């Protein structure tokens, strides 16, 4: 009887299912682990998430592969630095990106300008040589092996999350100081030309005066020498 009871107890113990404990990430100071990569899409000099994954084994949020063109990056804003420069900032898309570049165009001008290729870790770039007092359209484009993102405006009513890769900004008019500098430079150049012309004229007059004086003395000396003979 005792043997049968013990067998039933052993059978009951072997049929008990183990209780699964939830997996805990982190185990105290200095031993913290992250399931997902510490990645900020809008941080300047941010390494791509797939690079962080290769280095640390962390997970990336859902991103498209390089077999598809990048999704739209989102343009954060424009900081106008002066009448000829503006800093453009943006956030990366959830895609593999190899490079970026900027399209920018002055309103009313059919020509569209393109920046040099921008490193994939950058989130800021300064446009230079802009025209003072002008309105510009600017668009950030992401590039990978499959193609590039588009610059079509995103309908804000379509999604509250959707962000556009393009925006408009205005450069301030040229300051009076900058307008005055070319005038001063032109006046200085004209004055320099006048001074050089006067100097050359004076040199020619002095040179020819000395030459004629020397020539007269030589002729007089020759006449005296001939008379003495």
Image (cartoon, helix red, strand yellow):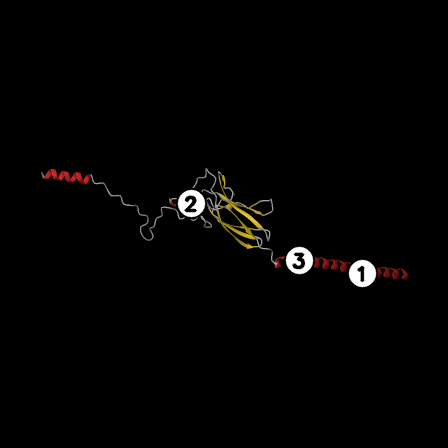
Taking the image as shown, residue 204 lies to the left or right of residue 31, namely: right
Secondary structure of the residue carrying numbered label 1: helix
Q: Secondary structure at mark 2?
A: helix
At x 80% / y 60%, what residue is drawn?
Answer: 209
Sequence-earlier tag: 2 or 1: 2
Task: Name the disc covering residue 209, or none.
Answer: 1
Q: Earlier in the sequence, mark 1 or mark 3?
A: 3
In the rendered image, which residue does mark 2 sit on? 49
Please tell me which residue is depicted at 10% across the width and 39% down the height of the picture. 2
Name which of mark 3 and mark 2 comes first in the sequence: 2
Place residue 220 in its image quadrant.
bottom right
Q: Is residue 128 left or right of residue 123?
A: right
In the rendered image, residue 216, in percent from the top left (x then y), is placed at: 84, 60
Residue 167 in picture, x, y percent from top left: 52, 48
Q: CA distance from mark 3 to mark 2?
A: 53 Å
Return the residue at label 3: 183
3D distance between C-alphas at marks 2 and 1: 83 Å
The image shows residue 121 at horizontal and vertical percentages of 47, 47
Could you tell me how far apart the alpha carbons at marks 1 and 3 are, in whole angstroms?
39 Å
For the point 63% across and 57% down, the residue is 179
Element type at marker 3?
helix
How many marks can you see?
3
Residue depicted at x 73% and y 58%: 194
Residue positioned most to the left: 1
Q: Give the crowd class for mark 3: few <14, some 14-19, many >=20 residues within 10 Å.
A: few
């Amino acid at each position: 009887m005792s043997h049968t009871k013990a067998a039933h107890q052993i059978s009951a113990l072997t049929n008990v299912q183990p209780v699964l404990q939830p997996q805990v990430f982190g185990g105290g100071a200095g031993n913290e682990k992250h399931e997902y990569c510490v990645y900020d899409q809008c941080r300047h000099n941010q390494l791509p998430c797939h690079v962080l994954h290769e280095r640390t084994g962390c997970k990336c949020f859902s991103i498209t592969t390089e077999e598809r063109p990048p999704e739209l990056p989102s343009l954060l804003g424009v900081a106008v630095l002066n009448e000829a420069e503006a800093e453009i900032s943006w956030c990366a898309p959830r895609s593999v990106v190899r490079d970026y570049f900027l399209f920018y165009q002055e309103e009313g001008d059919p020509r569209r300008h393109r920046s040099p290729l921008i490193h994939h870790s950058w989130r800021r770039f300064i446009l230079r040589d802009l025209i003072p007092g002008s309105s510009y359209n600017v668009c950030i484009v992401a590039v990978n092996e499959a193609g590039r993102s588009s610059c079509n405006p995103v309908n804000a009513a379509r999604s509250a999350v959707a962000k556009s890769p393009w925006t408009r900004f205005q450069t301030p008019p040229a300051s009076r100081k900058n307008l005055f500098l070319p005038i001063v430079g032109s006046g200085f150049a004209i004055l320099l030309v006048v001074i050089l012309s006067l100097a050359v004229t004076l040199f020619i007059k002095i040179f020819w005066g000395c030459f004629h004086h020397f020539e007269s003395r030589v002729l007089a000396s020759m006449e005296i020498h001939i008379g003495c003979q």
